Image: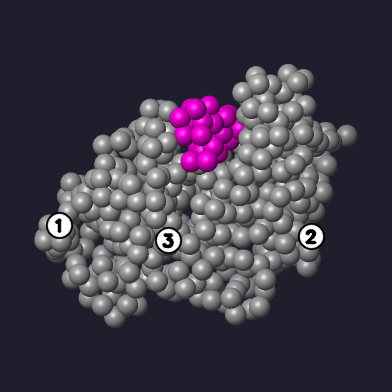
């Protein structure tokens, strides 16, 4: 008899009775609040076209780098998982075979956030009550595949079923936002907005930097190899994104370095970069870092003009596995956290704009050693700064608790921005928000049990962390 899959109602809560009871009461007050997803990477085409998801493998495995990086770590090739190669060489095409591999190796995910998210999806979205393993793989595939070809599992219907109030996708500065335009024209009431991601046209070390400058020139009718017209083109694109619903920008720089160059210095640097060649290897690392640093200050300046909230996501060594990058491209699970410095790095930007309450800059980190030493003191002082939630590798129960423990005493709750799921895996969104709401209830219950906070105040904070702070921080 296959083992039963059961989600315990008190999962993640303390084993200490007093704290568990308080956490349960706090969680019950926020469990059913609408989901505000202010930053993520879901595909707007899903909501524009509203077509059935192809099959369980295309939906739950291929878009989710949390899944395939773990499988790859155990010697399962990306070809076996059906990920397309850049050179067109053959990869596994049978989605059921790929699903079988995933199911046979599902124990790899025990103790990870992925198991929490996936089991939540299996139970609450598809009504499956058996554990996923080699024996139940075919049953899972059939149940999920059959469901995906019904009206109740179309993207818009799931959006509504999940009680999503708003979801933000993330698009490159040169994107035409055609799918967002289609959503707006459809009359559907679901709120799907974009966010402006200019990395491809700001980072000289991006492999498509030169070609994207060409595209930016084409879509703005400006010469983007001329610094002044390049800046004007970025302002034009920001205005277009804002007209399409964007309330934020997103910057995935390697570091948090900022620099306030004069116009003459910036022109000279830009000319040196665009004339250096067509390959990122032709640009010096120092020039690339200085230009990114300067452009963060320019983006802050533009945010003061147009009101878009800035998000800074630094500290990832992107595409660490050169072989995978050459064969499969970006975002294939080979991004590794780096140690990052914020206090000195952000000072040029903060010297210029830090005391201006009209600027909103949300800081994220993959370097948890900076929480209490740098980020919480910075956000606990400068009016323009807020702390984003535990991010990426730390979007986990323990990661969320570490974040609260190391930042709350200095920055409080209200210099943070609630939760965002930052995911490509659409069906994991309710699970991710549920985990965040549970862990905030756990942390607040500790404070109540220790008489540092009364339960009435904790309930207000829990609701703000689950819903109110994200709406306010992202102007939603």
State whether residue 39 appears in this view. no
**Quarter that holds the C terminus:** bottom right
Mark 1 falls on what kind of element?
loop
- Disc 2: CA contacts within 10 A as few (<14), some (14-19) or many (>=20): few
**Quarter that holds the N terminus:** top right
| Disc 1: which residue | 262
Q: Does the magenta stretch include residue 24?
A: no
User: Which mark sits nearer the N-terminus, 2 or 3?
Assistant: 2
Q: Is residue 365 left or right of residue 162?
A: left
When the figure is inspected, residue 63 is found, relative to residue 172, above or below; the finding is above
Most extreme residue toward the right, as rendered? 1
Quarter of the rendering containing residue 315: top left
| Disc 3: which residue | 308
The percent coordinates of residue 249 (x first, y second) are 42, 58
Residue drawn 78% across the image and 47% down it: 124
Of marks 2 and 3, the one in the foreground = 3
Q: How far apart are marks 2 and 3 (CA)?
A: 42 Å
Residue drawn 52% across the image and 45% down it: 417
Mark 3 falls on what kind of element?
loop
Camera-side residue of 468 and 270:
468
Residue stretch in magenta: 389-415
When the figure is inspected, residue 219 is found, relative to residue 40, above or below; the finding is below
The percent coordinates of residue 296 (x first, y second) are 30, 53
The percent coordinates of residue 471 (x first, y second) are 57, 54
Q: Distance between the residues labelled 2 and 1?
A: 60 Å
Q: How many marks?
A: 3
């Amino acid at each position: 008899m296959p083992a039963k899959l059961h989600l315990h109602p008190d999962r993640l809560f303390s084993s200490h009775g007093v704290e568990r009871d308080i956490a349960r009461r706090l969680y019950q007050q926020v469990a059913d609040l609408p989901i505000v997803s202010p930053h993520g990477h879901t595909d707007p085409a899903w909501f524009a076209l509203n077509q059935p998801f192809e099959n369980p493998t295309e939906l739950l495995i291929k878009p989710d780098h949390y899944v395939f990086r773990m499988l790859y770590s155990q010697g399962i090739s990306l070809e076996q998982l059906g990920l397309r190669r850049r050179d067109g060489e053959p990869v596994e095409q049978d989605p059921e075979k790929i699903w079988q591999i995933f199911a046979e190796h599902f124990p790899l995910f025990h103790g990870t956030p992925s198991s929490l998210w996936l089991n939540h999806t299996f139970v609450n979205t598809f009504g499956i009550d058996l554990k996923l393993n080699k024996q139940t793989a075919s049953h899972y595939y059939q149940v999920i595949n059959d469901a995906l070809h019904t009206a109740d599992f179309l993207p818009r219907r799931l959006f509504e079923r999940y009680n999503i109030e708003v979801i933000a996708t993330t698009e490159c500065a040169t994107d035409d936002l055609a799918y967002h335009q289609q959503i707006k024209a459809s009359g559907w009431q679901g709120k799907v907005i974009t966010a402006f991601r200019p990395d491809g046209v700001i980072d000289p070390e991006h492999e498509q930097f030169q070609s994207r400058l060409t595209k930016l020139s084409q879509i703005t009718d400006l010469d983007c190899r001329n610094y002044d017209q390049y800046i004007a083109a970025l302002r034009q694109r920001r205005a277009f994104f804002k007209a399409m619903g964007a309330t934020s920008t997103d910057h995935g720089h390697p570091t948090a370095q900022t620099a306030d160059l004069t116009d003459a210095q910036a022109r000279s640097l830009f000319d040196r970069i665009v004339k250096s060649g067509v390959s990122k290897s032709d640009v010096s690392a120092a020039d690339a870092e200085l230009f990114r640093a300067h452009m963060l200050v320019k983006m802050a300046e533009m945010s003061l003009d147009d009101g878009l909230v800035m998000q800074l996501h630094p500290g990832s060594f992107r595409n660490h596995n050169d072989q995978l990058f050459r064969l499969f491209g970006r975002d294939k699970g080979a991004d590794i956290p780096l140690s990052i410095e914020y206090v000195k790095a952000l000072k040029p930007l903060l010297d210029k704009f830090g005391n201006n309450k009209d600027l909103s800059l949300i800081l994220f980190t993959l370097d948890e050693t900076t929480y209490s030493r740098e980020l919480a003191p910075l956000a606990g002082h400068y009016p323009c700064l807020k702390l984003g939630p535990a991010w990426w590798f730390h979007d986990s129960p323990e990661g969320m608790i570490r974040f609260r423990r190391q930042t709350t005493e200095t920055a409080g709750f209200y210099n943070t921005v609630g939760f965002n799921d930052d995911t490509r895996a659409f069906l994991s969104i309710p699970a991710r928000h549920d985990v965040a709401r549970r862990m905030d209830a756990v942390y607040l219950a500790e404070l109540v049990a220790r008489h540092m906070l009364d339960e009435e105040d904790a309930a207000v904070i829990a609701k703000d962390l689950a819903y109110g702070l994200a709406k306010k921080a992202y102007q939603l």
